[in-house]
Image (spheres, rainbow, N blue to C red):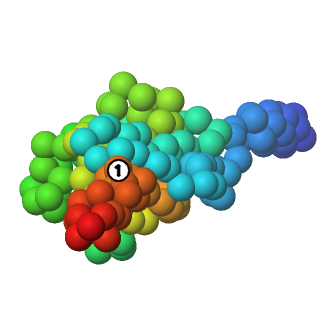
Amino acid sequence: MLFIRQEHIMRCFLVLFWLISLLPVSDQGKYHLVGPEEPIKAQVGSDVVLPCLVKPAVDARDAAVEWMVDSSKTVHLFRNEADDRESQDDRYKDRTYLNHAMLEHGDVSLKLSNVTKNDEGIYSCFVRRLPDLSEERHVTLIVDDGKENENPDKHSGGKYLNN
């Protein structure tokens, strides 16, 4: 009888070991953020989307998502499944939008409305979803104010006014 019990225990152990082997392996290091390699360009007064995606796609609704500019100012913060407007830098108030429905698909892109020349810079997208994801991605924004293409003599008076 003792032999049967040991055999039964061994069989249970093997079944349990097999079931454990079916569980997913830790996702540590499995996910990463992707975004554009080239700068994003926008016109003053327009809206722009700063792309940032979790790959492979994972539900980021339970993550902390923070967008910063020049590594110092909080542009947008999403945590505890809601936007945290208290942490946001004043110059971005009421101009940012993180699509909560798209978070489910790993899309943590940020929409910035009514772009100004002062918005130009390097934006950082941080995603923290412990224990399997904690990463950052940089997106460069270049803002065209339309002044580069103007003729300098047109507004300065130039040499033609003195003739």
- Residue 19 falls in image quadrant: top right
Q: Is residue 68 visible?
A: no
* Residue carrying label 1: 146
Is 96 situated above or below 72? Answer: above
Viewer-closest of 91 and 149? 149
Viewer-closest of 10 and 65? 65
On the image, the x and y values in percent for residue 49 come to 40, 40
Left or right: residue 26 compared with residue 96: right
On the image, the x and y values in percent for residue 115 come to 27, 47
Is 110 situated above or below 72? Answer: above
Dot 1: element: loop
Q: Quadrant of the N terminus?
A: top right
Assess disc 1: are there few (<14), some (14-19) or many (≥20) residues with their C-alpha within 10 Å of its C-alpha: few
Left or right: residue 74 compared with residue 68: left
Q: What amino acid is found at the position of numbered circle 1 in the picture?
A: Gly
On the image, the x and y values in percent for residue 42 come to 40, 46
On the image, the x and y values in percent for residue 27 come to 64, 50
Residue in the image at 50% along x and 37% along y = 106
Farthest residue to the top: give it: 101
Residue in the image at 46% along x and 49% along y = 41
Viewer-closest of 98 and 130? 98
Q: Is residue 93 visible?
A: yes
